[in-house]
Image (cartoon, grey):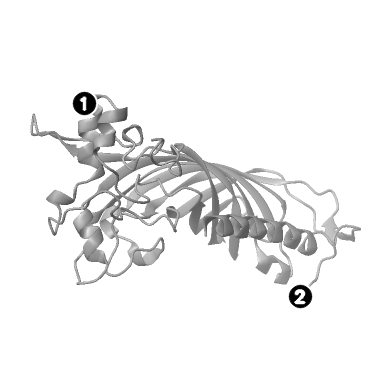
Amino acid sequence: MKQSLHSLSWKCLFVLAVTLCLSSTGYSQEAEQNTTEAGFTVGPMVFLGDLGGHAGKGTTFIKDYNMNTTKLAIGAFYAAYPAQYLGFRLSLNYGNIEGSDADIKPNGGDEETRLGRNLNFRSTILEGTVMAEVYPTVLLEEDPDDVAGRLRPYGVIGLGLFHFNPQGSYHDPNTGDTYWVDLQPLHTEGQGFPEYPDRKNYKLTQMNIPMGVGIKYFLSDNVNLSFEIIHRKTFTDYIDDVSTKYIDPSLFYKYLSPTQAAIAVAMSNKAAGGYSNKSYTDKSKRGDPSQNDAYFTAQFKLAIRLGGGRETQWRNSTHCPLIRF
């Protein structure tokens, strides 16, 4: 399933490239110059994965959104617009995500198992993306260069690189203190252990595919405000350090130091302190490997034009044909 999703994502990017070619420059402008903008974004960042959620089977969609796990994300960007209907954006974003099984409200369904699992996590997200913005309604405008007071919907898609580092809350039985510990070095599902050759150590820096929609309002020729929702498709199921099944806890003492092993045992299986006090043993289901983790942002974007412009005289071009509406 993961391979098919990966293939589908690249097909979508290919279709985008072809669409841009077919819809682009049957007409171009004399003395054309790029318009460039820079600005910042701010808004919530939300995790969708194995931990937390609502009644029924867990998903990686908005159905399992827990309001109290919403965290703020900020970002900065630089964008270039070779045409009014097309832009290319380079952005850097920083935010936080988290998830907790304790947020689930029991309703007698599949959520009972996740609630009893009793796991939680948090992570910072540092992300860089390159995205294309497409403004389809520009093709219907009589004077696209007259932007002041104009409202334009748009779609975005691109490629990104993000860094994460899942941490879980650990209760120290010796001191009684609770603090956050990094989960990846603990190999909580046996990642990298010879006994589980199919469970590889996951990397903390991964690729993603950001995709979404937005709407832009031009306050003036040089300032605009947008609101956009961008979903990130990822290629890892370990943003929350939960993916597949529990392992034999004795293996932690085989491959980790005694101190690390004791923490790993506690962090890999917290069910004893959970909702149902149910015992989860070796090979019990811990997560759902059929669905990768995801996250999204819902942000306001303020942009200021740095320079550039264009004249409004059109001429024929030999590039890909444009269908005018």
198 with respect to 171 (left or right): right
What is the quadrant of the C terminus in the image? Answer: bottom right
Tell me residue 295's x, y (percent): 43, 53
Tell me residue 149's x, y (percent): 58, 63
Residue sitting nearer the eye, 249 or 94? 249
**What's the amino acid at mark 2?**
Phe
Q: Which residue is mark 1?
A: 259
Secondary structure under tag 1 reads helix
Relative height, residue 79 to residue 66 (above, below): above
Mark 2 or 1: in front is 1
Q: Measure the C-alpha gap from mark 2 to mark 1.
A: 68 Å
When asked about the image quadrant of residue 108, the answer is bottom left
286 with respect to 171 (left or right): right
One can see residue 145 in this view: no
Secondary structure under tag 2 reads loop
Query: Residue at horizontal 26%, vertical 41%?
Result: 168
Whether tag 2 and tag 1 are in contact, CB under 8 A, the answer is no
Tell me residue 201's x, y (percent): 43, 37
Q: Assess disc 2: are there few (<14), some (14-19) or many (≥20) residues with their C-alpha within 10 Å of its C-alpha.
A: few
One can see residue 261 in this view: yes
Query: Residue at horizontal 54%, vertical 60%?
Result: 212
Q: Assess disc 1: are there few (<14), some (14-19) or many (≥20) residues with their C-alpha within 10 Å of its C-alpha.
A: few
Q: Which residue is mark 2?
A: 325
When asked about the image quadrant of residue 13, the answer is bottom right
Count the numbered circles shown. Answer: 2
Q: Which mark is residue 20?
A: none
Tell me which numbered mark, 2 or 1, is placed earlier along the sequence.
Answer: 1
**What's the amino acid at mark 1?**
Thr
22 with respect to 176 (left or right): right
Tell me residue 190's x, y (percent): 35, 39
Residue at the front extreme?
Answer: 195
